[in-house]
Image: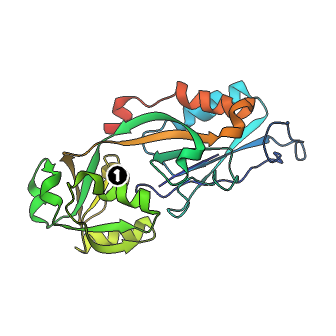
Amino acid sequence: MCGDGPDEEEDESRRGGGADDRNTQEPEQEAGGPRGLERGEPRKPGLRETHIIAEFARRRPGWRVDMRQAAWSEPSAGLTDGDTDAALVRMPFPGQDALRTEVLFSEPRWVALPAGHPLAVREVIPFRELWDEPFVAARVGPRRRDYWLATDEREGHPVRIGAVTDRPDDWLSAIANGYGTALAPASAARFYARPGIVYRPVSGIGPSQVGVAWARADDTDPVVQDFVRCCLDNRPRPADVTG
């Protein structure tokens, strides 16, 4: 299975343990090893991954969930190409309409600012006050990029791009160097803390959502559906997301 990333760098995975292409038949075990269910995912702060994996192990003894981190350039974490069985994803993402998704939790979008920025002293920043700021954008598809630039919530005000980056480290460096600001999940303040960068809540924009996604063809795959159920039964507590 797989997940995605600052948003975070996405987790990706390939089907493991000898699983067949659709995982609708039980694969042969390799030298007595566990059967594999791949979950492609970007790292999702707040997810109770150990609980999900433990519950899946109870439901499917002998199966293993293989996880890996996906790149920003692969926001579906391998689902679109059929490389993974399920993914933990931040929505929206390109190709989402062709897949099944269930929301696991929502969290506010905050802004990442250079520590010396005049707005960094504010406790909450109205989004309107960021409209004229240059933004650091990720090199992703237009739908995902527009979402993290909040283009639909600018009342037609044009976006200023200060830098475009491919990786989280470059994204953080561009902000710290003063090339621009950027919207990020609230949890980034904990998981992507860095000297020279401050995170502040933003009013006037909607929250971000994290969900589990899978192929429509796997609606009847009992193994994939067991994993989905484990995710739904272990939605994070509010404190896991915002604390």
Closer-to-camera residue (242/75): 75
Q: Is residue 80 above or below residue 177?
A: above
Task: Name the residue rendered at 41%, 55% in the picture.
Answer: 7
Numbered circles on residues, count: 1
Pointer 1: what residue?
188
Q: Amino acid at mark 1?
A: Ala
Specify the quadrant that holds the N terminus: top right
- Vertical order, 134 against 85 (above or below): below
Quarter-wise, where is residue 111 in the image?
bottom left
Q: Quadrant of residue 213?
A: top right
Mark 1 nearby-residue class (10 Å; few <14, some 14–19, many ≥20):
many
* Residue 12 coordinates in the image, percent (x, y): 61, 55
The quadrant of the picture occupied by the C terminus is top left
- In this view of the protein, can residue 150 be seen by the observer? no
> Going 47% across and 38% down the picture, which residue do you hit?
47
Whether residue 133 sits left or right of residue 174 in the image: it is left
Image coordinates of residue 132 in percent, x first then y, are 15, 66
Left or right side of 29 for 150: left
SS for tag 1?
Answer: helix
Give left or right: position of 111 versus 9.
left
Q: Position of residue 152 (x, y in %)?
A: 29, 53
